[in-house]
Image: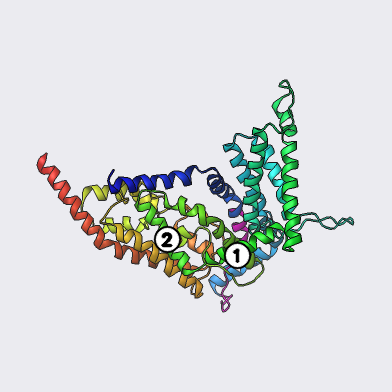
């Protein structure tokens, strides 16, 4: 086995691990599953926060439009606040259920009862009932993204405890004649109690030793990682790794996203909460960073590749691929170009594939951190065209302008490399024509 085969084998194992490892897969898919809730919360934030500059002339045409938007926002404030509270405000509740549900499916357990059991445990430690004097209430401090790591821990551990007890036949067993829908709640009773005792016991120890509950302790443990995830070097490394994996033929977004997406979602939710409270947005690197600031059109900033090819390429093959696959890149769907060109292991395009997205990420990070453009606080669908996504995520027109400027720079960087690759393809086509 030569060096390249060993490298391919090693990289294949990495890709297989991230795609098939049950816990990573359930966490990744669970976060994707709750995307509709984040989008609904984002729409509520957009309605509630018209982008009115401080020195806006409210008698101008644009000022009149924004003034009308502000009146609508004030009239609907009760409803937009409710929508935000029921989506982003309790995001960890949804995550607990979806992750437990998906992992239970991989363990061949009853998904509904297992995920309900996980929810029960999560509420017991993250939102214990207070005020037993007739004013019962549950605290909501850790029901939003701050409780995400607790949600992941609870979902994974409760499923594994349930799986262990089921395999060891430590559960109530009813006669086979009893319908499954009737038997399932009784079979789940012992795992329910075991998980509740386990986590409440750990929570009691945490309060006794550390003077804080499990969610607070977990956030304190992860706070250095959360802080590290929002730095210039993190933005650079994030962009580089995603595209390095893509260049090697692996799904970089899935591999890198499985690790960092929970942190980015926490950052985005913190920004949304700050915007709702009228405070300064604390984070730059947030969820959807890949489409907002890194890969415009897809891996390697595919949109710039398509436009550069249409401008300078003469090869029939390259032009046909870009004509067929170019339109989807407007919606960040790059597979036709990625696999048709191809971009993977393309030595002519390796340097710009790694350089261009990294440059995009660094420039956008610096512009946001220096408050040249607004920071993102609205979750947006990943298929939104770039300038629209940039504006809606930040409610700042300058973010859309920066996106356009970066695409122009990306095209200029790609053009000489596309020319080199094009010359090679032209020689191949000429040789084939002569042979024919």
Q: Quadrant of residue 305?
A: bottom left
Q: Quadrant of the C terminus?
A: top left
Front disc: 1 or 2: 1
**Any part of residue 295 in sight:** no
Which is nearer the eye, 267 or 60? 267
Residue under label 1: 223
Q: Report the residue at 70% width, 46% height from top.
A: 119
Q: Position of residue 147 (x, y in %)?
A: 66, 57
Element assignment for label 2:
helix
Q: Quadrant of the N terminus?
A: top left
Q: Which residues are magenta?
A: 39-59
Name the side, left or right, on which 426 lies relative to 319. left
364 lies above or below 14: below
Residue 333 shown in magenta: no
315 lies above or below 377: above
Q: Residue 239: give its label.
A: 2
Q: Quadrant of residue 99?
A: top right
177 lies above or below 5: above
Q: Report the residue at 56% width, 79% height from top.
A: 55
110 lies above or below 242: above
* Residue that extends furthest to the right in the rendered view of this protein: 133
């Amino acid at each position: 086995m030569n060096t390249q085969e060993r490298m391919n084998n090693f990289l294949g194992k990495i890709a297989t691990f991230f795609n098939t490892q049950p816990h990573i897969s359930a966490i990744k898919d669970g976060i994707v599953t709750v995307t509709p809730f984040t989008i609904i919360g984002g729409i509520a934030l957009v309605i509630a926060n018209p982008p009115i500059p401080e020195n806006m002339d409210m008698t101008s045409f644009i000022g009149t439009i924004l003034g009308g938007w502000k009146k609508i926002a004030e009239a609907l404030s009760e409803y937009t606040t409710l929508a935000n509270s029921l989506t982003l405000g309790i995001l960890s509740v949804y995550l607990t259920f979806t992750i437990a549900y998906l992992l239970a499916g991989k363990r061949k357990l009853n998904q509904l009862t297992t995920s309900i059991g996980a929810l029960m445990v999560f509420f017991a430690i993250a939102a214990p009932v207070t005020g037993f004097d007739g004013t019962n209430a549950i605290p909501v401090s850790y029901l939003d993204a701050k409780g995400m790591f607790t949600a992941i821990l609870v979902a994974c551990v409760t499923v594994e405890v349930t799986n262990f007890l089921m395999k060891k036949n430590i559960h109530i067993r009813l006669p086979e004649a009893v319908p499954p829908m009737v038997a399932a709640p009784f079979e789940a009773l012992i795992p329910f109690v075991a998980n509740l005792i386990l986590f409440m016991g750990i929570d009691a120890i945490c309060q006794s030793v550390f003077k804080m509950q499990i969610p607070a302790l977990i956030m304190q443990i992860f706070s250095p990682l959360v802080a590290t995830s929002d730095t210039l070097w993190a933005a650079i490394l994030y962009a580089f790794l995603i595209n390095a994996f893509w260049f090697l033929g692996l799904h970089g977004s899935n591999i890198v996203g499985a690790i960092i997406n929970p942190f980015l979602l926490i950052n985005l939710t913190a920004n949304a909460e700050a915007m709702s409270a009228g405070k300064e947005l604390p984070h730059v690197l947030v969820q959807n960073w890949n489409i907002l600031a890194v890969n415009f059109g897809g891996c390697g900033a595919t949109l710039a590749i398509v436009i550069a090819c249409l401008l300078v390429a003469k090869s029939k093959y390259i032009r046909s691929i870009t004509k067929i696959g170019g339109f989807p890149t407007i919606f960040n769907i790059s597979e036709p170009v990625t696999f048709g060109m191809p971009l993977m292991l393309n030595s002519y395009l390796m340097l710009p594939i790694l350089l261009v997205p990294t440059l995009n990420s660094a420039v956008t990070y610096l512009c946001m951190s220096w408050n040249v453009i607004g920071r993102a606080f609205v979750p947006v669908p990943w298929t939104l065209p770039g300038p629209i996504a940039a504006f809606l995520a930040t409610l700042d027109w300058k973010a859309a302008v920066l996106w356009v400027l970066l695409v122009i720079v990306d095209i200029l960087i790609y053009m000489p490399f596309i020319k080199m690759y094009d010359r090679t393809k032209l020689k191949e086509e000429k040789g084939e024509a002569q042979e024919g």
